[in-house]
Amino acid sequence: MAQTTQHTEQAEKLTHGNGFVAALDQSGGSTPKALKLYGIAEDEYSGDEQMFDLVHQMRTRIITSPSFGGDRIIAAILFEMTMDRDIEGRPTADYLWNVKNVVPILKVDKGLAAEQDGAQVMKPIDGLDDLLGRAVDKGIFGTKMRSVVKMPGAGLDAVVDQQFEIAGQILAAGLVPIIEPEVDIHSPAKGEAEEQLKAAIITHLGSLRDDQQVMLKLTLPDTDDLYRDLVEHPAVMRVLALSGGYSRAEACERLARNHGVIASFSRALTEGLTAQQSDSEFDKTLDEAITEIAAASRT
């Protein structure tokens, strides 16, 4: 019963809460880059185990910072290994919700397949049912999975078809999926791809049952308020924006022009944080980032 009450409270926070979603889900491939930006060079550790220990220390430092809390951060997206580890002696998802009042979400995809027809679908997600079962046991509310679109066309449709197909499996497990078909910000046909993407998403939303909702995580569009119909769609719990390589300043500026959309930034959130900073410097830098992103998410 507690799970149901918790799920209801978390759904309420995600649907109506003020603030944004922190994306702390860099995985194997993107971790060295994340650590390098954080001021830890690749020659300072050896092997995956040490690398993941270091990145967990970084995430722990962010999550336990006084500036990181449910007043401005609605949810946090975690990498599987972060879900399986502890923060201050408590499982990460439990710490996030019960100490920080931040909803825990799990990244479930295993990376991208090779580009085909101007897009990259996800690689097969082996053992997904098992992972979803573990996520439910650990008090995770929802999931996130990312594909990439470079150009409009058949590849884009394949991306959306796959996202919604796996979303059905996630909904069946009792979790709320974040569908993330990222449009590459460098695409020469970005605006056209976004128009096609919106139409494809609306079609798929129409096939969900009345009691089902998903979240969407989308690239900040070339046309302001392009996704207003999605923000207002009954089958959409929340529309999130990814920073996609824009600097934090530009991402926040674009976000503020898209009403009802909130941030789910990764690199733009951790911009400027380093291992070498004192705790007070670290907290101040993080607080400035959270303040700026939360303000842009309020429009």
Image (spheres, rainbow, N blue to C red):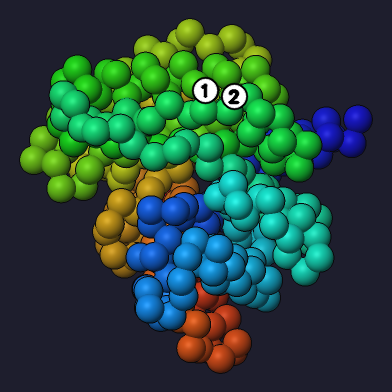
292 up-or-down from 257: above or below: below
Q: Which mark is residue 170?
A: 2
Q: Which residue is mark 1?
A: 167
Q: Secondary structure at mark 2?
A: helix
Q: Is residue 69 visible?
A: yes
For the point 53% across and 12% down, which residue is it?
208
Q: Residue 105, position in %: x, y?
A: 61, 44
For the point 41% across and 14% down, which residue is it?
204
Callout 2 crowding tier (Cα within 10 Å): few <14, some 14–19, many ≥20: many
280 up-or-down from 86: above or below: below
Question: In which quadrant will I find the N terminus?
Answer: top right
Question: In the drawing, does residue 126 fall left or right of residue 230?
Answer: right
Question: In the drawing, does residue 148 fall left or right of residue 180?
Answer: left
* Front residue of 76 and 118: 118
151 up-or-down from 266: above or below: above
For the point 38% across and 53% down, which residue is it?
29
Circles 2 and 1, Cβ within 8 Å, touching? The answer is yes
- State the separation of the CA atoms marked 2 and 1: 5 Å
Q: Amino acid at mark 2?
A: Ile
Q: Which mark is residue 274?
A: none
